[in-house]
Image (cartoon, coloured by chain):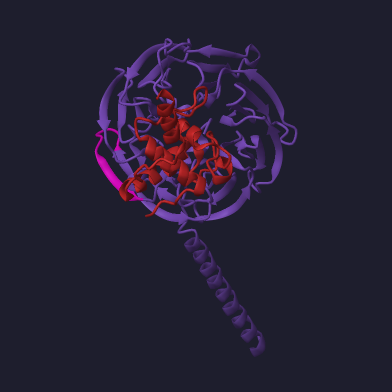
Amino acid sequence: MDRASVTARLSSRVAIRALVALCWCLLLAGCAATSAQRGTGDLGIVIERADGRVAIVETTARRILAKVEGLGDLSHASAVFSRDGRYAYVFGRDGGLTKVDLLGARIVKRVMQAGNSIGGAISQDGRLVVAQNYDPGGIKVFDAVTLELLAEVPTGSKVVGLVDLPGNRFAYSLFDKGEIWVTDLADPRRPHTRRFPAGMHPYDGLVTPDGRYYLAGLFGEDGVALLDTWQIDKGVRKILENYGRGEEKLPVFKMPHLRGWAIAGRHAYLPAIGRREVLVVDTERWQETRRIPVKGQPVFVMARPDGRQVWVNFAFPDNGWVQVIDTLTGQVVQTLQPGKAILHMEFTPRGEQVWLSARDDHAVVIYDTQTFARLDSLPLQSPSGIFFASRAARIGF
Amino acid sequence: MRLIVLMIVSMLYVMPKAWAEPDIARQRELIHWVRQDCGSCHGLRLTGGLGAPLTPEALRDKPMAGLVATILYGRPGTAMPAWQAFLSEGEAEWIVRQLQQGFPRESR
């Protein structure tokens, strides 16, 4: 081997080593940018409603990881998650739809899709994000990757209670028209919609965790509209009719919210409109089995993931209280005062903690659901909705 | 005599009322309350939601008395409840005036 070829071989070796070193550097830098490789199973977001900002939080260490600014009017904001749990789609009051990367702590894409919006849902296959709008009333269908508009279904009414159903279908209610609509998005660009009369002023809706029954709570009358989506031709049937027995309703200072968390075991726990009661319904016969008196008019009635407890918060002026119902006895077992203006609650995926937003204390407070001990308090400005990424895997969330 | 009483009463009704303005602390409470709690239906920016928009443009042609009555007694057949247990007529009128002028932001 002559001298020249030895030198060449040596220098190529050096070059390869340098290249390998460079690759490592790039790899490490890439990791640092996403704050080390990690999953999102214990992550979530909290809405800071007055500042157009969301905080990215972690439930394992109970800490705020980052804040993301620039999400517009979040007066009434809600979020759904991509099926890999990495992205949150945040729906704002001003019609903004923002895709937030939980790991990168940044906005990936943001579109203004309506004048006034209330929430949204994601399809079973994760490919479609659907927004429900007040103005102009209707739903809009977006590509979950690009947020490109694929289709819209105008309703001529404010839309509430949008949920995903198996088969890339979506159910929702028309506040002004008193109807439930089910839109099939098997072909996203050609929505196919069926309409059902529901009752006066549906205010929100939920789908049972198995994706079968869609329920719309009615504001304009005592009762709940029920649609069996496995036997959709049978149409809507009214349950819990006249639960107020014609008694005078209390003024309702805040609309209750419904979602699949209302189901614990074989029972649904629903807020009674204009009454200081939680209604318990047998989900096999769809009949009222019990009503539980509580401290105020319920807003959120949420079952812990194991269904053993149901946590209830209340409308103004009782919004400083939270009560816990034991589902075995049907009794209120705890009455808590977690803070001023408790707007929302969210359980960790398996329910050992509950996070509550105390809007007027500018804090999210965290309780142990077994001992009811207060574990922590995180400083956040006017917090409202709390959404954990574990929602990604649940029908109706 | 009756006529005079009626005239005085109706004048009192029509004349701008000399309500004492709510004091600063109460004003701050009312601003917070309108933004946050009325805001759950009408939006923090009062641009509407389930409830109607409460912007100056939206309220421009609406009479004061009707708006005050809506706040105090609600609107039957809609989701607007009666708030009279929580505020006086004077405070409701102060709120309407602020809404018509462009509602103040909350101070932090």
Q: The chain drawn red is chain what?
A: B
Q: Quadrant of residue A303?
A: top left
Asked whether residue B90 is in view, the answer is yes
Residue drawn 62% across and 23% down? A177
Q: Is residue A108 left or right of residue A75?
A: right
Q: Position of residue A147 (x, y in %)?
A: 65, 46
Q: Is residue A194 magenta?
A: no
How many numbered circles are shown?
0
Determine the residue located farthest toward the right in the rendered image.
A190
Is residue A262 placed above or below A145 in the rendered structure?
above
Left or right side of B90 for A236: right
Residue B99 % position (x, y):
49, 44
Q: Is residue A83 visible?
A: no
Q: Name the one closer to the observer, A27 or A144.
A: A144
Is residue A372 covered in magenta?
A: yes
The answer to whether A198 is drawn above or below residue B100 in the figure is above
Q: Is residue A223 left or right of residue A335?
A: right
Residue nearest the observer in this picture, A36 or A322: A322
Q: Which percent across, then down, holds residue A364?
A: 35, 45
Residue farthest toward the front in the current orientation of the protein: B1
Instruction: Where is residue A372? Give x, y as percent.
Output: 26, 35
Residue farthest to the bottom, as pictured: A3
Colour of chain A in the image:
purple
Image quadrant for the N terminus of chain A?
bottom right
Q: Is residue A281 above or below residue B80?
A: above
Look at the picture and state if A353 lies above or below A290: below
Along the line of sight, which residue is nearer the eye, A85 or B25?
A: B25
Pick the front one: B45 or A19: B45
Q: Which range is magenta? A: A368-379
